[in-house]
Image (spheres, rainbow, N blue to C red):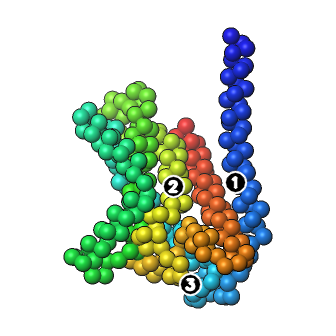
Amino acid sequence: MKKEYLFYKIVFSIFSFFAMALVYLLISFILYKGLSSISVELIFSDANIVDAMMFKERVFDGIFPAIIGTLMLIFLSLIFGIVFGVASGIYLSIYANTKVKEFLTTCFELLATVPSIIIGVFFLLLSIYLHKIFMSNFLPSLLLSSLALSLLILPYLVKNTQLCLDNIPKEIKHLGLTLGLNKMQNLFYILLPYASKELTSGIFLALGRACEDTAVIMLTGAVASAGIASSVFDKYEALPFYIYYISSEYSDQAELNSAFGAALVLLCIAILLFLFTSLLQKKFRKKYA
């Protein structure tokens, strides 16, 4: 029995090692290729740094507009996704009866299997329809991309919220009710604070999905040189689309290196957001421990 246990332990350890090695190999490759390309010129080109950061001067050849566009895109898609995803997960866990829960769970699971390119095409056709029938100024834009990405991450947020609430121990679930709280008060004062750490983890996973998708945004509003969007109805630049565009259209090694530099910046944004999420988790853990 000990030999069998040791054998499986070694096999699983090897697979785990190779999985982690692939991750670190990827990160090391991006660092190796991207570090040499990181410069003020890559981000701001020949624009004045202070004026560019104050949005007084437009950056034409740098990736600063793409960085701002990426942050705006992530922020908006998370707002839409969290509002609808967390609300749907709460409904499935607390309020829905068995038949409704089974039906909606199947719907969200099917939505999770839909390729992102199909979601992008759907929202592109939706914008064309709305442009022709209802709103002549409704075109592919930051708002449309945010809605498309929120639909893409919606199943993850719904499932995570539902599982977090379902896995709360029964004595905790009924604690507020026995003290005289109604269902809504019990939800906001007891259940959500108790599951806040796990909810934050699910939001981070959804955030990572929103950071990297290119197929959706290239069909719904991202372009190569739009500058910083002045409203949610404008086209915008984003780092994933910039990386794709440069990598597929580069004319020399310098342009390709700029794509690696942009990839490193995108990776740094994802890491910073991860650290921010970790800080939130620690705060929730201390507050509700």
Q: Amino acid at mark 2?
A: Arg
- Disc on res. 26: 1
Q: In percent of the image, x 68 and y 72: which residue is there?
A: 256
Q: Amino acid at mark 3?
A: Phe
- Disc on res. 209: 2
Residue 185 shows up from this direction: no
Side (left or right) of 51 relative to 115:
right
Residue 15 shows up from this direction: yes
Between marks 2 and 1 in the image, the one whose residue lies nearer the viewer: 1
- In the rendered view, would you say 269 is above or below 283? below
- In the rendered view, would you say 191 is above or below 236? above
> Of 10 and 276, which appears nearest the observer?
10
Q: In percent of the image, x 75 and y 56: which residue is there?
A: 28
Q: Residue furthest top?
A: 1
Identify the residue position indicated by label 3 in the image: 55
Q: Earlier in the sequence, mark 3 or mark 2?
A: 3
Mark 3 surroundings within 10 Å by alpha-carbon count, few (fewer than 14), some (14 through 19), many (20 or more):
few
> Of 181 and 187, which appears nearest the observer?
187
Q: Earlier in the sequence, mark 1 or mark 3?
A: 1
Q: CA distance from mark 2 to mark 1?
A: 17 Å
Q: Earlier in the sequence, mark 2 or mark 1?
A: 1
